Image (tube, rainbow, N blue to C red):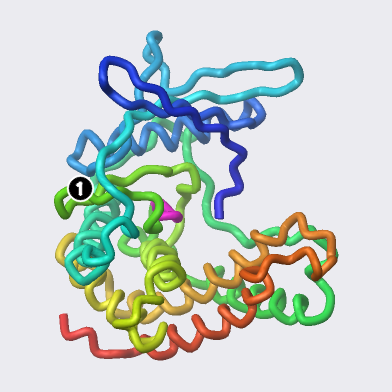
Amino acid sequence: MSNSTNEVYKYINNNQMYYLRLSEKSIEYEMSIQAEVHWVRFLAMNGIRVSLPLLTVEGSLTAVCRDHEKCYIATVFEGVSGKFFDSDPQAWDSPLFKRWGATMGQMHKLTSSLYEPMDSQHTRVKWSTLDIDNPHLHKGNYAVLVNKLRAIEQELMSLPTNPEAYGLIHYDFHPYNFLIEHGEINVFDFDDSLYGWYAMDIGVAATHAVWWGSDHPKWRSKNEFSKYFLTSFLEGYLEENHLDYEWIKRIPLFMEYRNISSFFWWLKDWDGDEGKLTESQKNAITDAVALIQANKAFDGCDLQL
């Protein structure tokens, strides 16, 4: 879901792995990236296992590089250790889901209670409605899905933004943005972070978990996996951070939003030729319907926490 344009390079120095990230952005965007890096360093200093951003030799959070007409904002992160979720099928189960939820709960709790941005200029953006500029996505069946997206966005815009439920969130805390090490989770890739609802952050994680982790034969359906995942995830989350049940009931809404908005993000540069779509893109609307049904199966269920 990232709207960023990044080039990432891995290198090793003194047996430590590092990642250089170059973001092709205007110079005005540097403050937003500094806000991201400042928050991640705060999380690291407070015990969250993250890919630590390093300071420059001058003590700055970022560096600006120019190549003719292009401007790149550079950041360096320490590499984290561990394995991806799909390297060990046995690990993809309740203990990991609970740890994942606990890690997110810790991040939300720490941020809401202790974190202060650098200043009013160095802050991340607030969640806003999705721009759909591609004219081909406003025709036929695609327009139907646009209308569904806009209806969900209207509902989200009406939600309260009280500090107990709304704050700085990762917004892309999916299974390929963390590594597993001895049952613990090492998180990275915060460049989509923004101000949004904590239940939205949970919904994003759950949506991606269903996409990539519900095909094992042990799960009879996406519905079954969705309920199982969220029950375990929320058990860990609620041990670390309180979230009213009214917000928990909204998680399926946020899952539905993520699923549909992802469809339009994938096709943002599509030229209208359906013959050029991949099989996964062709099946995206079908998958959206399937996930909506999975969300309904979870909605209102007794979590037994």
Instruction: Using a 10 Å C-alpha cutoff, classify the residue at mark 1 as few (fewer than 14 neighbours), some (14 to 19) or many (20 or more).
Output: few
Residue at the extreme top of the image, as rendered:
58
Name the amino acid, label 1: Glu
* Residue 172 sits in quarter: bottom left
- Marks counted in the figure total 1
Residue shown at 23% from the left, 70% from the top: 93
In the drawing, does residue 248 fall left or right of residue 97?
Answer: right
Residue shown at 48% from the left, 88% from the top: 293
* Residue 146 sits in quarter: bottom right
Q: Is residue 3 above or below residue 249?
A: above
Q: Is residue 203 above or below residue 59?
A: below
Please tell me which residue lies in front, 277 or 201. Answer: 277
Please tell me which residue lies in front, 127 or 25. Answer: 25
Give the overall secondary structure of the magenta segment.
loop
Where residue 66 appears, as percent x and y from the top left, is 65, 16
Magenta residues? 168-173
Q: Is residue 172 above or below residue 24?
A: below
Where residue 166 appears, as percent x and y from the top left, is 39, 60
In the drawing, does residue 35 fall left or right of residue 99?
Answer: right
Quadrant the N terminus occupies? bottom right
Please tell me which residue lies in front, 88 or 293. Answer: 88
Q: Which residue is mark 1?
A: 181
Please, what secondary structure does the residue beneath circle 1 have? strand
Q: Is residue 239 above or below residue 179?
A: below
Where residue 71 appears, as percent x and y from the top left, is 66, 23
In the drawing, does residue 22 fall left or right of residue 227?
Answer: right
Quadrant the C terminus occupies? bottom left
Residue shown at 28% from the left, 74% from the top: 244
Residue shown at 66% from the left, 71% from the top: 279
Q: Is residue 238 magenta?
A: no
